[in-house]
Image: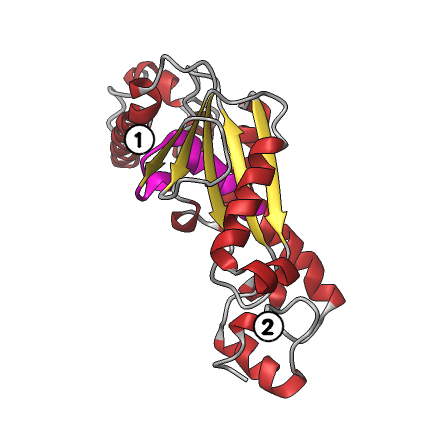
Amino acid sequence: MAVKSIREIREEFKALSPEEIPEHMELYRGDARKGVQDFLKTQENRLKKYEAELLRIEELCSFEKKYSDYTYICGVDEVGRGPLAGPVVAGAVILPKDCRIMYINDSKKLSAKKREELSREIHAQALAIGIGLSTQERIDEINILQATYEAMRKAVASLSVTPSLLLNDAVTIPEVDIPQVAIVKGDARSISIGAASIVAKVYRDKMMEEYDSMYPGYGFASNKGYGSKEHIEALHRLGPCPLHRRSFLKSIL
């Protein structure tokens, strides 16, 4: 049998799931080539990282396990409280109890590409997903905190499955009859809240990218409405557009 090149071995391993790697590594333990042995070490490190991620994800389910008597546990989180422009968006996600989506985390700790990948997987596996938003006009009318609560209520109300319990990132939502648990830094401590954070972030980012073509010059596609240097300079040059939160601009303009 022809000896495989190191490049061929690398390609072979790319197609393997982490669970398949240990058995496959044994096929090349006797290969004396330094390049092969160095590559096997990288695969060992890959497995260690994977095993550490499995443990992290299991820890991320600790609140879901604690409240496992509730049939439908829903994570709730918001994005966009701080920007100068655009809506505040909330996500609500109900995952199956045995769901373990790898790499879910606080959306701010993930790259845009990873958030999009995870958002697709969350949509594929979730029992129900809800999105709610409050516009910039509404934020100016009732203030950002009340608008955030409103967006969260809308997200929960839009779910196709009625939650038994809400796990919220740091807040208790007024005017909601469902039992709630507020978890500080919940998007990094609960898989359900982390999933809601990712779904909401991807949804809002896409909105802001679309707004960029409607209101050019502010850099909405890149800054997503946050107060970057480019954005503030554009505000002084162009003035505010209909997307801006007027109540947020008092100290800038």
Q: Residues within 10 Å of mark 2 (few under 14, many from 20)?
A: some
Query: Above or below — where is 188 with respect to 82?
Result: above
Residue found 60% across the figure and 39% down from its top: 154
39 sits left or right of 192 in the view: left
243 sits left or right of 201 in the view: right
Q: Quick check: is 189 in the magenta stretch?
A: yes
Task: Inspect this view and state whether residue 226 appears.
Answer: yes
Position of the C terminus, as image quadrant, is bottom right
State the SS at label 2: helix
- Disc 2 versus disc 1: nearer the observer: 2
x and y, in percent, of residue 102 in the image: 40, 29
Quarter of the figure with residue 98: top left
Mark sitting earlier along the chain (2/1) = 1
Query: Above or below — where is 26 with respect to 111?
Result: above
x and y, in percent, of residue 107 in the image: 44, 46
Residue found 47% across the figure and 36% down from its top: 76
Cα separation between marks 2 and 1 = 43 Å
Residue carrying label 2: 246
Please give the range of residues in magenta.
184-202
x and y, in percent, of residue 251 in the image: 47, 81
Residue situated furthest bottom in the rendering: 237
State the SS at label 1: helix
Position of the N terminus, as image quadrant, is top left
Q: Main secondary structure of the magenta part?
A: helix
Q: Quick check: is 163 in the magenta stretch?
A: no
Q: Residues within 10 Å of mark 1 (few under 14, many from 20)?
A: some
- Say which amino acid is labelled 2: Arg
Residue carrying label 1: 53
Residue found 61% across the figure and 42% down from its top: 132
x and y, in percent, of residue 198 in the image: 49, 41
- Say which amino acid is labelled 1: Glu
